[in-house]
Image (spheres, helix red, strand yellow):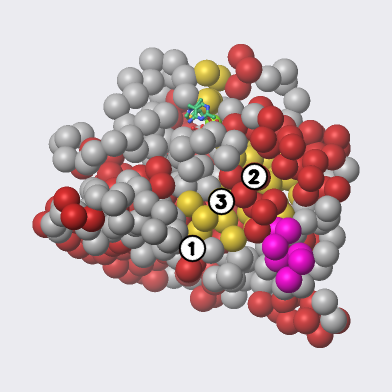
Amino acid sequence: MTEAEVAGARERHGELDKAALLDAYRTMRTIRDFEERLHTEFATGEIPGFVHLYAGEEAIAAGFMAHLDGDDYVASTHRGHGHSIAKGCDVKGMMLEIYGKDGGICRGKGGSMHIADLDKGMLGANGIVGGGPPLVCGVGLSAKVRGTDQVAISFTGDGGANQGTVFESMNLASAWDLPVIFVIENNGYAEATAQAFSSKGIDIAKRADGFSMPGVVVDGHDFFAVHEAAGEAIRRAREGGGPSLIECKVNRYYGHFEGDAQTYRADNEVENIRKEKDCLMLFRQRVTSAGLIEESELDKIDEEVKNLIDEAVKEAKEAPEPTPDKLLTDVYVSY
Ligand SMILES: Cc1ncc(C[n+]2csc(CCOP(=O)(O)OP(=O)(O)O)c2C)c(N)n1
Ligand SMILES: [Mg+2]
């Protein structure tokens, strides 16, 4: 990249102005409402398949995606609604998809765990734990060979972080200086297994040392902390400085999947986190106490998002199912 291109990229992804703060809040609020509404609707039995909710982890998706352009890439997980919304996927199209309807973002054939929109750089939610990191090595290599300043971010859970695919990808990304960021969303559990049962007590971020790349831990409830760490890693990747590992410590508000009885969690575990660490609450406190944004401006976003989600659910329920003649379309890229 020339110096002018680097300067341009810096400007594009620089400090948060008021519009960027409002955008970040809207993203987090949209994810929260989307997920809370799915929690209620799933209980009615109308939604097919598995649903894994991202509520509680919104600051991570919003903090990273605030730095991305439309042509940057994201590879997500089975808990992918938040990443998809933050990367700009159509919210109503996602709701239709989760309901398995014809107008869904993948024509109702993917469902919650396969939401993808390649036009938005969203490579997909992914039912394969540890499946995202190899994908970002692929698109990262492509961006490098084509000489663009695109970056690629993979999200992986604390459980997924122990998959061989993740280590292999970090090794290759480092050896080839790929413009890639490996994000670990450490919510303390892999299904019902607490992290202490599957790994020996060190921060996952320290594994970066083994691959000669920077590794940092951030509070995944704090949008500003995530945004800052993300900005540094993404800037480095765009400038040709290679990959990074960022571990975000966070909590999930609901079970592993909808329907999980969560007998493995302490009483009041989630209630206490909601009171003390909720990302929307922390964000609101910070921007209003600093005089950056009025409470009423955030309330207005809350209202607009509520209406959007109401409409999305209503439209998804009323939409037609795919017809049998569509059974064999979209199976292969060309056929
Ligand atoms: C390769 C593979 N192994 C196992 C599973 C079953 N599985 C689905 S989610 C999950 C736990 C993932 O935990 P983590 O990576 O911490 O993500 P979280 O659900 O906490 O977001 C497992 C074992 C899978 N989908 N794919
Ligand atoms: Mg986990």
- The x, y position of residue 194, in whole percent, is 55, 19
**In the image, what residue occupies the spot 32% across and 46% down?**
111
**In the image, what residue occupies the spot 41% across and 24% down?**
268
Mark 3, residue position:
75
Secondary structure beneath dot 2 equals: helix
Secondary structure beneath dot 1 equals: helix
Q: Say above or below: 311 vs 11.
A: above
Quick check: is the Cβ at mark 3 less than 8 Å away from ligand 1? Answer: no
Whichever of labels 2 and 3 marks the residue nearer the N terminus, that label is 3
- Judge left or right: residue 320 versus residue 231: left
Disc 1 residue crowd, few under 14, some 14–19, many 20+, Cα 10 Å: few
What span is in magenta? 140-146
Marks 2/3: CA–CA distance: 7 Å
Whichever of labels 3 and 1 marks the residue nearer the N terminus, that label is 3
Mark 2, residue position:
133
Q: Which residue lies furthest to the right in this view?
A: 212
Disc 3 residue crowd, few under 14, some 14–19, many 20+, Cα 10 Å: many
Q: Residue furthest front?
A: 335
- The x, y position of residue 46, in whole percent, is 16, 40
Whether 144 is among the magenta residues is yes
- Judge left or right: residue 302 versus residue 81: left
Q: Say above or below: 51 vs 62.
A: above
Nearer to me, 44 or 75: 75
Quadrant showing the C terminus:
bottom left
Q: Are marks 1 and 2 in contact (CB under 8 Å)?
A: no
Mark 1, residue position:
118
Q: In which quarter of the image is residue 39?
A: top left
Q: Residue furthest bottom?
A: 4
Marks 1/2: CA–CA distance: 17 Å
